[in-house]
Amino acid sequence: MPAYLIRHPGKASDDILLQDDPLTLTFAGGWAIFADAGGTCLAIPAKAGAHIERVDHPIGSAPQKE
């Protein structure tokens, strides 16, 4: 299940991690819109300057270098 880390530059206390199953991200009219099975759950205007990063949970351990 993907999750999205939303960071607000200069405002670390406002950072949030969104995760839900299913969670979708779309862009429309200058907005980033997150929705789940119940509908829109968060909308962030592009002017807010937020950074959105998709975070995939690892399925297994990464191979170790020798």
Image (tube, rainbow, N blue to C red):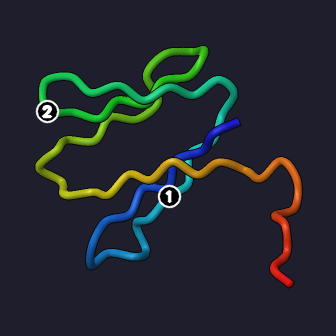
Q: Quadrant of residue 38?
A: top right
Badge 2, how many Cα within 10 Å: few under 14, some, many 20+? few
From the viewer's side, name the closer residue of 26 and 63.
63
Q: Where does the image place residue 8, in percent across and percent down from the top left?
A: 31, 65
Q: Is residue 32 left or right of residue 41?
A: left
Q: Position of residue 41 (x, y in %)?
A: 47, 29
Where the C terminus falls, by quadrant?
Answer: bottom right
- Using the image as rendered, state which of residue 38 and residue 27 is in the foreground: 27
| Structural distance between the alpha carbons of marks 2 and 1 | 20 Å
Residue type pointed to by label 2: Gly
In percent of the image, x 29 and y 35: which residue is there? 32
- Extreme residue in the front direction: 66
Question: Pointer 2: what residue?
Answer: 30
* Sequence order check, earlier mark of 2 and 1: 1
Give the residue type at disc 1. Ile
Residue at 88% of width from left, 53% of height from top? 60
